[in-house]
Amino acid sequence: MAEKRKKNSDRRRPGADYVETVDAPDPVGRLSVKKTWKLYIGGAFVRSESGRYLQTADKQDNYARASRKDVRDAVKAAVAAQPGWAGRTAYNRGQILYRLAEVLEGRRDELIASLTLGGASDAAAEVDATIDRAVSYAGWTDKVHALLGTHNPVSGPHFGFSIPEPVGVVACVAPDRPALLGLVGAICPIIATGNTLVVLASELDPRTALVLAESLATSDVPGGVVNILTGSRDELAEHMAKHQGVRALDLWNIDGEAAKQLELLATENVKRVTRRLQPAEAWYDADECTSLTWLSSFLEIKTVWHPMGA
Amino acid sequence: MAIKLVEDGPETQSTHQRRRGERRLDFGTAWEYAPAPERPDHVRLRDRYGLFINGRWVSPESGKFFKTINPATEEPIAEIAEGSEADVERAVAAARQAYESVWSKMRPLERGKYVYRIARAIQERARELAVVESMDGGKPIKESRDFDVPTTAAHFFYNAGWADKLSYAFPGRAVRPLGVAGQIIPWNFPLLMAAWKIAPALACGNTVVLKPAETTPLTALLLAEIIREAELPPGVVNIVTGAGATGAALVNHPDVDKIAFTGSTAVGKLIQRALAGTGKRMTMELGGKAANIVFADAPLDQAVEGIINGIFFNQGHVCCAGSRLLVEEGIHDVLVAKLRDRMATLRVGDPLDKNTDIGAINSREQLERIEQLVQVGEDEGAERYTAPCPLPEKGFFFSPTIFTGVAQSHAIAREEIFGPVLSVLTFRTESEAVERANNTFYGLSAGIWSNKGARLFKLATQLEAGVVWANTYNKFDPSSAFGGYKESGFGREGGRHGLLPYLVVE
């Protein structure tokens, strides 16, 4: 695939290694159509409002380099989609996540090709684990209440109960590797319970995140529930951490001074910050990565008191 | 427009509770319906079904078959194998083998993925399943289409998701499957009851032998087809059709680790007796005589809908049917008048007609039992009102009926009729309502209708019933436990609690 693309390429991109000569095209051959990889915001594929772009490491594709304004647009879309998403029944959200797994299975070859091009070591295993991850979270949507909700035997004539509710809009900085499994593994615990999110994709393989975006767009996940940005982590993470519409921040593999700066910015509106350092192979530990604690990071608990008497 | 607004004059005073001059909508005979039958031409049924054992269709050892009929036409639909002790033996052996060699060793998520496949296939074949359910059992197509089949899929879907999360269900304890579960299900919700039984059993890692009811085996056999198409390992689900003797063979089989039974309290007691001392686990979901309690402050029109649904849903063949209406004395006459008006709009007839509210009684035997208990009700002095619905000439049908002036001592207030027959009793105080509601051997469900939240929650804690519906009735969800107190059985199905009967908590 890579071979063919190169051969048929007739464009020179700024920033690419300068190529003196281009292979002469086969006069009776067919020229492949190249795709413009765009951001996924509010269910639509959009170029960065900044007009900037970056090139994939394999130099096969250009992709949009999101700006601060794109972050804001994405949060706006996530905010707009959140009540509707949370308002669906847990069963329906479960079916939609399962549908995502079905769609991913259908795009298995495309995902493997993209991951391979993006430098994944075992793309097939990663895609399989990713699909299974979505299936596992499909089963979580309607079960967190049974495990985190309580009836409270209060002293007095009241019927009390505490129930989990989504925190709202979450901003997530996904891990670089595994580019797909890490992304889906980070997205699922956030959206399963009714949150919506803005996620900044792997810098090492942003294209696969956009193949995922196409899977999301053709699954039943409503537009705006998952918004995927590509671009520079150093540039964008702070805007995600600062945004007042964001209620929780989910940071992967960010450490040291950078982590401290983001956590400081998060204090502005008391964001809940989850920050984990996880080596790539740890994402294959399904038990750990589908843990209830991963879901509860993005939940509030609401306690209700109701009188019980005449 | 055919609906008339009428003012009651002396000529309509037969409905004696109605206040003079009160206006109401008269639906009587004025509202004509064109037939709207669901066409069964897309349904592919075989003439004869064998037993589903070890992933294959096999003939019964005895060579005997019986007919399953359409209770709305009394015509045979298909021939069904009569499973004998030897067949049960084969099925249990297949289930044991599948348990030991595959199912208990499979990664939990993979197990769940098989169950998801079943859920999806049920959704894909929803219409076919709904039509067959209505043909074989007599329930209205609008119920099989909008309730039975979607809820069946939901149960598989819900339980599939537990497969890889069982360690959360009982925190701090390790869990493991039981082994082989024997499951016996009733004829009132044939496919749904199969789902309630099979879905949690499989998700928890057990294999099963299921015996459907004698009069309604077809959808369970279609489910066997689905299970085959979903490529479940052979022997994980086995379906052995037959009557009481087949069920008894399953109950008495020494290599079955657990019996799950849904059916009458009488048979439940027999099974509990048979299993006494064996150490086998069991769950029992048995009969009911639910109180549906209406307070004077209730939203009456909503209550009327809930009462109608509570007793006439599925021809009243519902273990949790609200068959005892307890009405606060002051609103008795008004409520009964409203109920009669509403009953006059119910359409009894062809289960496959999309307008039908009340379909066919499941069997001649059940129809006779209903007729007999209704006769006892009249003989004991309660006042009978039967809605003036025309009934089809063929098939087993019974018009919706209510009894007023029922005393606690009457048979129709104590015994489960399992038909479209409501007994109305009254109460004066809240504590009397609770006392009357609890004055039964049963304890499956209850309904409360009141505008006062504080009262709803108080009564909910005082009623001896496994399910309490407040200002609603007959609500079911895979995420919610269902099951009885007292002689309505033990164990729960649905929700986190529904897993426990299929697990050993170590």
Image (cartoon, coloured by chain):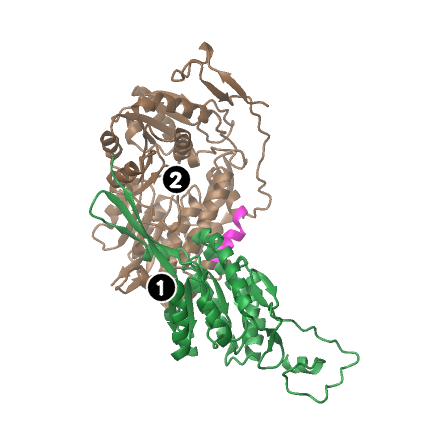
| Residue depicted at 25% across the width and 48% down the height | B274
Q: Is residue B204 magenta?
A: no
Marks 2/1 same chain: no
Res A112 seen here: no
Q: List the residue tagged with mark 2.
A: B474
| Letter of the chain shown green in the rendering | A
Nearer to the camera, A181 or B45: A181
Label annotation for residue A292: 1
Q: Which region shows up in magenta?
A: B117-127
**Dot 1: what SS?**
helix
- The quadrant of the image that shows the C terminus of chain A is top left
| Residue depicted at 49% across the width and 45% down the height | B79
**Where is residue B489 shown, x and y percent of the image?**
28, 44
**Where is residue B99 shown, x and y percent of the image?**
36, 63
Nearer to the camera, A293 or B63: A293
Q: Amino acid at mark 2?
A: Asn
**Where is residue B330 shown, x and y percent of the image?**
31, 22
